[in-house]
């Protein structure tokens, strides 16, 4: 079966002018040419064109594409090589998309760190994981806007200091639980107060009643529960109860 240059242009999405150019440089000469000069492309020409288009997607120069196609390799081997190259490119592009997503999510939260810095500071504990959800749930609140404004000023050193403070506080809570301290004990309430003040200092004004609402979320949302309970089983519920006791202590004064 023979195809005209117009039909090949329509099938491939290339222009007739491009096909003329491919013919002129010997990249895709038609198998048939009438006395009038009219080009006729065979099915084998279309197969070659398909491989050309694959290599073009890989952004190879036309002269290199020609060398690859005319190198004597079996067409199936060429297709296998193209598939491997495309799969490698897809993997790289997917990685780039992940980097861009993480960067955009960080900017949404006001965190001005590049992806490498985010990983250096937070490791696997990605703070941007729920950025879109946070914006949807609290984006119209003063607390969210205040948090974004403060976070946008922090440097990598600031975030490392914040993380270190959080780790020390978590370790102190775990130690209190291991010592059998009840949530309404003064030691537990003081730790809950430290947690409240950390939020107040780093992100947004957090009065005791707002802290109580956060504490309830630590228990109601399995994701928050898992974040705390990975350090010590039951820590999320213990902290929630300590937060409630601390708020009652504030109300009594």
Image: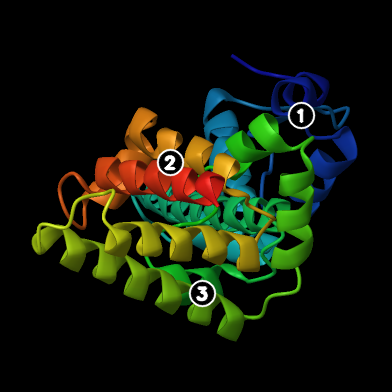
Residue 215 is tagged as 2
Q: Residue at the location (51% across, 49% down)?
A: 94
- For mark 1, does the 10 Å Cα neighbourhood hold few (<14), some (14 to 19), or many (20 or more) residues? few
Q: Nearer the viewer, mark 1 or mark 2?
A: 2
Instruction: Provide the residue designation for mark 3.
Output: 162
Query: For the residue carrying disc 2, how many other residues have a C-alpha within 10 Å: few (<14), some (14-19), or many (20+)?
Result: many
- Disc 3 versus disc 2: nearer the observer: 2
Residue projecting furthest to the front: 253
Q: Which label was assigned to residue 13? A: 1
Using the image as rendered, state which of residue 204 and residue 251 is in the foreground: 251
Which of the image's four quarters has the N terminus?
top right
Question: Considering the numbered disc 3 on the image, is that residue within a helix, a strand or a loop?
Answer: helix
Quadrant in the rendering for residue 13: top right
Give the vertical position of 48 relative to 113 (above or below).
above
The crowd level at tag 3 (other Cα within 10 Å; few <14, some 14-19, many 20+) is: some
Estimate the spatial distance between the alpha carbons at disc 3 and disc 2, rounded to whole Å: 20 Å
Q: Secondary structure at mark 2?
A: helix
Q: Residue 110 is drawn in which quadrant?
A: bottom right
Q: Is residue 152 above or below residue 252?
A: below
Tell me where residue 104 appears, x and y as whole percent: 68, 53
Judge by depth and name the residue closer to the eye, 122 or 61: 122
């Amino acid at each position: 079966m023979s195809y005209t240059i117009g039909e090949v242009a329509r099938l491939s999405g290339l222009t007739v002018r491009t096909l003329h150019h491919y013919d002129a440089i010997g990249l895709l000469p038609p198998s048939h040419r009438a006395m009038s000069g009219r080009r006729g492309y065979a099915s084998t020409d279309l197969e070659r064109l398909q491989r050309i288009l694959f290599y073009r997607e890989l952004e190879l120069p036309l002269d290199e594409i020609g060398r690859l196609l005319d190198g004597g390799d079996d067409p199936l081997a060429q297709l296998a090589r193209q598939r491997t190259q495309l799969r490698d490119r897809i993997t790289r592009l997917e990685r780039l998309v992940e980097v861009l997503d993480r960067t955009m999510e960080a900017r949404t939260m006001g965190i001005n760190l590049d992806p490498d810095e985010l990983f250096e500071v937070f490791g696997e504990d990605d703070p941007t994981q729920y950025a879109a959800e946070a914006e949807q749930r609290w984006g119209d609140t003063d607390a969210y806007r205040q948090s974004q404004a403060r976070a946008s000023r922090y440097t990598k050193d600031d975030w490392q200091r914040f993380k270190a403070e959080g780790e020390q506080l978590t370790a102190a809570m775990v130690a209190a639980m291991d010592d059998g301290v009840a949530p309404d004990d003064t030691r537990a309430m003081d730790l809950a107060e430290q947690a409240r003040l950390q939020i107040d200092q780093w992100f947004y004004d957090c009065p005791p009643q707002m802290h109580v609402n956060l504490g309830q979320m630590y228990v109601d949302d399995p994701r928050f529960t898992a974040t705390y309970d990975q350090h010590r089983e039951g820590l999320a519920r213990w902290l929630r109860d300590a937060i409630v006791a601390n708020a009652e202590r504030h109300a009594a004064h």
